[in-house]
């Protein structure tokens, strides 16, 4: 079956540091890949996505590139802010249907803490 | 505001009680799904639906029932609550149909229901 593995935290960085959160996946076919962010006490918000190999998703200074050869979708940001403190989830949508009809498979989440 | 609405936000149940978690979306999304979030486990899929009248089991379906009588609503039923069902529950919805629509838009999540079973 499908699975997602991401680095577990907490990850603690100073403001303006470079961020990388690793994510690798196992899936058949061609899944779509997502990063979601969860702020304390809230639901999940879609941060960025990529639907095919070599696509780069980007939003709010965050980027991730769909690497089929390494089955990875690492999240990066050049300069983090205190407001980026949250839990980040890597996820994929099922590939057999091609369109995510069978929901999402999530990693366990990475708690990011940015210190001033 | 358009989106996914979950009720209630908080609930405490006694072991053996039953209840229904409500989920409604007003975006005319075909796909809907339920997840539970537990510490250190990420989100795990309970049940999902690809349209009215069609549901299927996810990774952790035991103890939960669902139905989808309308496009808008996708309630989750706990028939006999157990302490192991203490969790935060999220409902999500997405466009369906052609591959590109669901993949391009991703899933929209509700704000969650925090359930405690004592």
Image (spheres, coloured by chain):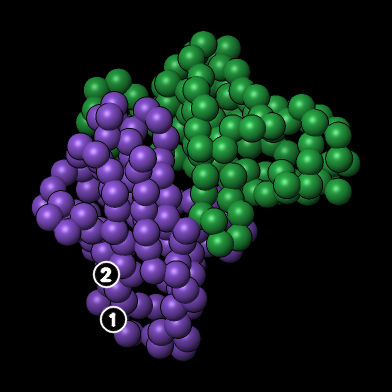
Chain colours: A purple, B green
Residue drawn at (33%, 69%) of the image: A21
Q: Residue at horizontal 17%, vertical 59%?
A: A70
Which of A113/A32 is in front? A32
- Whether residue A59 appears in this view of the structure is no
Tag of residue A76: 2
Q: Residue at x 58, y 24 (%)?
A: B74
The residue that mark 1 highlights is A18
Q: Is residue B81 above or below residue A53?
A: above
Q: Are marks 2 and 1 in contact (CB under 8 Å)?
A: yes
| Marks 2 & 1 on one chain | yes
In percent of width and height, residue B53 lies at: 51, 11
In the rendered structure, the residue with mark 1 lies on which chain? A
Identify the mark nearer the N-term, 2 or 1: 1
**Outermost residue, front direction?**
A1
Q: Is residue A25 above or below residue B101?
A: below
Q: CA–CA distance between discs 2 and 1?
A: 7 Å
């Amino acid at each position: 079956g499908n699975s997602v593995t991401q680095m577990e935290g907490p990850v603690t960085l100073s403001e303006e540091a470079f961020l990388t959160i690793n994510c690798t996946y196992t899936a058949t076919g061609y899944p779509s890949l997502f990063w979601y962010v969860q702020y304390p006490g809230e639901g999940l918000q879609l941060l960025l996505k990529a639907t095919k190999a070599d696509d780069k998703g980007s939003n709010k200074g965050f980027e991730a590139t769909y690497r089929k050869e390494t089955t990875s979708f690492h999240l990066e940001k050049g300069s983090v802010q205190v407001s980026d403190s949250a839990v980040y989830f890597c996820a994929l949508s099922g590939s057999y249907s091609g369109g995510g009809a069978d929901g999402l498979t999530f990693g366990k989440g990475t708690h990011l803490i940015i210190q001033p | 505001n358009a989106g996914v609405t979950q009720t209630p936000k908080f609930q405490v149940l006694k072991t053996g009680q039953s209840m229904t978690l409500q989920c409604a979306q007003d975006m005319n999304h075909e796909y809907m799904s339920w997840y539970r979030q537990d510490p250190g486990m990420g989100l795990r899929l309970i049940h999902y639906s690809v349209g009215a009248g069609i549901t299927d089991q996810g990774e952790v379906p035991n103890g939960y029932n669902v139905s989808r009588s309308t496009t808008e609503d996708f309630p989750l039923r706990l028939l006999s609550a157990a302490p192991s069902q203490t969790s935060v529950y999220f409902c999500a919805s997405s466009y369906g149909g052609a591959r590109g629509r669901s993949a391009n838009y991703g899933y929209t999540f509700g704000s969650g229901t925090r359930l405690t079973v004592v």
